[in-house]
């Protein structure tokens, strides 16, 4: 196995992580609004908290978006 193939294989096996900016872009919201949503009880728990902020697993966020968009607006 050559080096390029090895790196691609390693990267393919890693979970994709999203920060507030990526979630905001995905949902068409501001970063600040994503931070507000992240305080909701039904928002996924962060995968990790780094110096730059919290990060979430892409899969968890995608599942939450599907449920969020199907549910009626809740009083925050």
Image: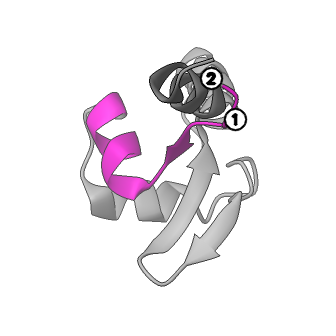
Circle 2 residues within 10 Å: few <14, some 14–19, many ≥20: few
Give the distance between the C-alpha atoms of the residues marked 2 and 1, in whole angstroms. Answer: 22 Å
Q: Disc 1 marks which residue?
A: 60
Residue 64 lies within the magenta run: no
The extreme bottom residue here reads 51
Q: Quadrant of the C terminus?
A: bottom right
Compared to residue 25, the image places residue 52 above or below, namely: below
Mark earlier in primary sequence (2, 1): 2
Q: Disc 2 marks which residue?
A: 9
- Side of 29 where 39 appears, left or right: right
- Side of 32 where 6 appears, left or right: right
Residue 16 lies within the magenta run: yes
Of the pair 67 and 73, the residue shown nearer to us: 67
Q: Which residues are magenta?
A: 13-26
Q: Residue at image x 29%, y 58%?
A: 31
Compared to residue 53, the image places residue 17 above or below, namely: above
């Amino acid at each position: 196995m050559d080096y390029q193939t090895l790196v691609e294989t390693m990267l393919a096996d890693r979970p994709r992580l999203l920060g507030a900016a990526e979630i905001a872009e995905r949902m068409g919201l501001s970063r600040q609004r994503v931070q507000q949503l992240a305080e909701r009880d039904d928002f996924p728990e962060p995968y990790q908290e780094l110096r730059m902020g919290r990060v979430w697993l892409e899969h968890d966020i995608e599942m939450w978006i599907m449920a969020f968009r199907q549910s009626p607006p809740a009083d925050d």
